[in-house]
Image (tube, rainbow, N blue to C red):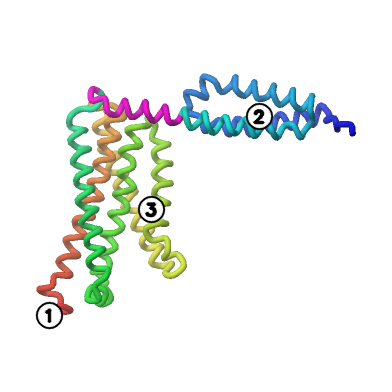
Amino acid sequence: MARHRLSPRAVRRIIAFSAWLYILFLRAYPEPFRRDFGSRMVQVFRDSCHDTLRRHGLAAIIPIWLHTLSDLINNACLERWQQLQEGSHAMINAQHFPRRLWIALATTVIAFAVSLVASLNLYLIEDASPLTQAAYSASTLLRVSYDGIYVSALASGVVMCAIAGYALLQRTMPVMIGLTLVGFVVVMGGFGGLIVRHPTSFLLLFATFMVLTLISLLVGRGAAARMEPALGHRAAMMLGACVSVGSLLLVNVAAQIVHMLLLNPVSHPLYM
């Protein structure tokens, strides 16, 4: 049976669409790699598609795409991994970061760990207590303080990722996109189950989470802008992220203090 031959116009359209899709997939590679090799890779792919369509017809384009996608996934992952390694090596090179940044990083990590342990301890102890549940039902402020502890802990965890993001990447936009994705995952994992059962509560918690996160990032951005002339862009942004986490931890500590004062067994009527 004779093979169906494509018209020149159909070949041009197929090649144009395939090249457009290939260029889109090339964004999986790091930008420096695309800048150095992207145009040549696209040209080689165009020539391969043209030769295949001319010799073997439309069906032969499928094996080319399978082979191309396989190579792209493998090589793009390798290039991204190499980029992360280079960023990690730059991060641990102490001559780029002043001592105050290392002190701020260590302090932020320790403070976050302590706050996280305290928040988890509060959750594990109080959530199983029938007296605590009764107290929450009787006092709106007590419930608000508990939610404040929970949401501020989640937000500080998200903003902690900004420190690693600024350490590995040079630009702010990829870090913000990454924080948005992490924030979405944290929100859905933290209190996403309320969407169906208690949508109003979900909206209130989500609004609180967003307000706390955005305010902390703005505070950190302001601190970074003031320190950038002395420290450089990357170090200043990392230190600004530490300030952002610190502001959220202050909210967390304040909420825990209010919560403990309200739920003091010495004065709370449920324990009298």
Q: Quadrant of residue 267?
A: bottom left
Mark 3 / mark 1, whichever is N-terminal = 3
> Foreground: 197 or 229?
197
How many C-alpha atoms fall within 10 Å of the one at disc 2: few (<14), some, or many (≥20)?
some
Q: Contact, CB < 8 Å: mark 2 with mark 3?
A: no
As rendered, which of 135 and 124 lies closer to the eye?
124
Q: Which residues are magenta?
A: 80-95
Residue contact between numbered discs 2 and 1, judged by CB atoms under 8 Å: no
The tag on residue 186 is: 3
- Comes first in the chain, label 2 or label 1: 2
Secondary structure at numbered mark 3:
helix
Q: Is residue 83 magenta?
A: yes
The residue drawn where x is 57% and y is 29% is 71
Residue 28 horizontal/vertical position (percent): 52, 33
Checking the image for residue 272, the label placed there is 1
Q: Mark 2 falls on what kind of element?
A: helix
Q: Residues under labels 3 and 1: Cα distance?
A: 38 Å
Residue 207 sits inside the magenta stretch? no
